[in-house]
Amino acid sequence: MNASGAWDSAELERAGALALELRPASGADARLIAARAPGRVNLIGEHTDYSGLPVLPVAIDRSTIIVAARSSRPEISLRNADRAWPPRSFRIERRIPPYPGGDWANYVKAAVQGVIDHFSARGIAMNRLLGAAMIVDGRVPPSAGLSSSAALTVSAALAFMAVNGLELAPIEAASMVARSEWYVGTMAGGMDQAASLLGRRDHALLIEFDPLRVRPVAMPADAALVVADSREVADKSGKVRGEYNRRVVECALAARIIAGALRLERVRILGDVVGRLEKWNALELVRVLEASAPPRLDPDLADAARIVGIARDRLAAELLGTGAARIVLDSVRPLEILRRARHVLGETERVYRAVVALEAGRLDEMGALMNASHESLARDFECSTERLDRLVQCARRGGALGARLTGAGFGGSILALCRAGDAPGVIEALDREYYAPLGGGAPIEWARAIVRAGAGASVIELAAA
Ligand code: ADP
Ligand code: NG1
């Protein structure tokens, strides 16, 4: 993963500045490690990853950088270039207790815990680990649907592994980090970490799961991607977590309803259903199930916990403890749940059609698929908001070929696909029709910007000063 070519000159400068801040604390000539991990936007394939179904994201030219100095003490001491995130320090031990929910350093703890679990499960002794002083500089806007959390977790995992001389192929690291983010309480799929680790310049990534695999798909040269922030915070370590986790559970229950109706065995997630029913058109399947009104299913929380494979008490805490969403798992309505499945199964078809459209350079078709994705997320998955819908409409009116929410939704950002020459006009339309009426002055440059497909995460060693 020592690919210094993945670093642009601005990132190397940022690493140099962080090194200057870190060195006095860590000894004048300490050899330092620098890890960078990008955020991502998702072209299509939303809320499919945790059902084991495909996604088509793009790693973006916005990254988080961590510079680390080894220390013989088994402790991670953390500072952040943005003083809004307070310093933290924690002991490296077999079971690292989390900070209270919402603490930024939990993502670093998640990464360290993930590395320890991964290597111990493979018989590598983890009792003599080195600690590190780390400083973080994140330029992926947080809680905007661009995976700042994955950029932080991936860069922390890479830095911690490098400090300890541990190596993993990027694809293995992606599986490891994906699972380790469950530590913060979000039952996420593996899209963000895979995109961050496996990103390729000028390419989107078709990512499939179980087992994780990736195929780069070239972005047509005349395509431009505009990201626009709704200014509605979608904080998954906070209030959005309950809604997100509820969708994960609903999709697992949908798989079970479908399996029951079709007498399929060994079905855990919707991906298992798709795998077994190749002859079915997925949307046709949902239509049949709707028409035949499957029997009412009243799973209790223990049942749901077993289906998604985590302890009942933890599920209860994650789903019910947030207060934001009243999760009523004992009165699940199968038809509502089937709408979630309709989105996921339809979205799966759209992902594969999108790959064909991109490879053929058919941007109009790609735009139409993105529009259909948004409609399905809004209507069936109920994760859009009035603001996201409005932003999507503005982008389309401004000349985008297609626009949709990107990331988990419930706020956050949208992504618009445009012909390169039309992107400035789309941004102008967003400023005029969306940001100006919101008030609060002109939007900051990053609130709406053209993003480019960039390289995946990597680690370099910084020369001693
Ligand atoms: P996203 O879609 O951006 O991943 P999340 O809500 O899942 O949104 O994660 C955002 C959280 O990640 C922040 O609240 C914070 O805890 C953490 N985070 C992200 N970037 C940084 C950073 N540069 N410094 C500190 N914490 C960060
Ligand atoms: P964002 O909103 O970027 O954090 C989340 C999940 C993804 C995926 C999408 C929806 C996390 C860390 N990531 O992305 O795995 O499920 O929502 O497609 O929660």
Image (cartoon, grey):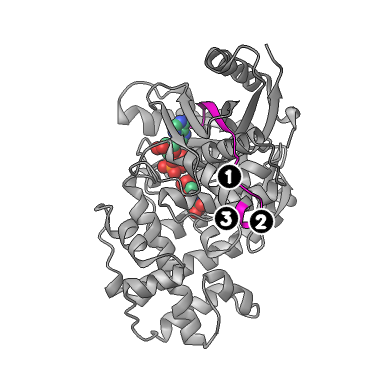
Q: Residue 414 colored magenta? A: no
Q: Secondary structure at mark 2?
A: loop
Q: Quadrant of residue 356?
A: bottom right
Which span of residues is magenta-colored?
Answer: 120-146
On the image, the x and y values in percent for residue 85 come to 39, 27
Q: What type is the residue that disc 2 sits on? A: Arg
Instruction: Find residue 155 and report its image quarter.
Output: top right
Q: Earlier in the sequence, mark 2 or mark 3?
A: 2
Position of residue 453 relative to residue 305, above or below, is: above
**Badge 3 amino acid:** Leu
Q: Which residue is mark 2?
A: 122
Q: Position of residue 172 (x, y in %)?
A: 67, 51
**Neighbourhood count class around disc 2 (C-alpha, 10 Å): few under 14, some 14–19, many 20 upward:** few
What residue sits 60% from the left and 35% below the top?
37
Which residue is located at x 62 percent, y 45 percent?
195
Locate ligand 1 by image quadrant. Answer: top left
Q: Is residue 135 magenta?
A: yes
Residue at 39%, 44% in the rendered image? 98
In the rendered image, which quarter contains the N terminus?
A: top right
Question: Quadrant of the image for the C terminus?
Answer: top right
In what element is the residue under mark 1?
Answer: loop
The residue tagged 1 is: 127
Say which of marks 3 and 1 sits in front.
Answer: 1
| Residue 401 appears in the picture as rendered | no
Judged left or right of residue 15, residue 139 is left
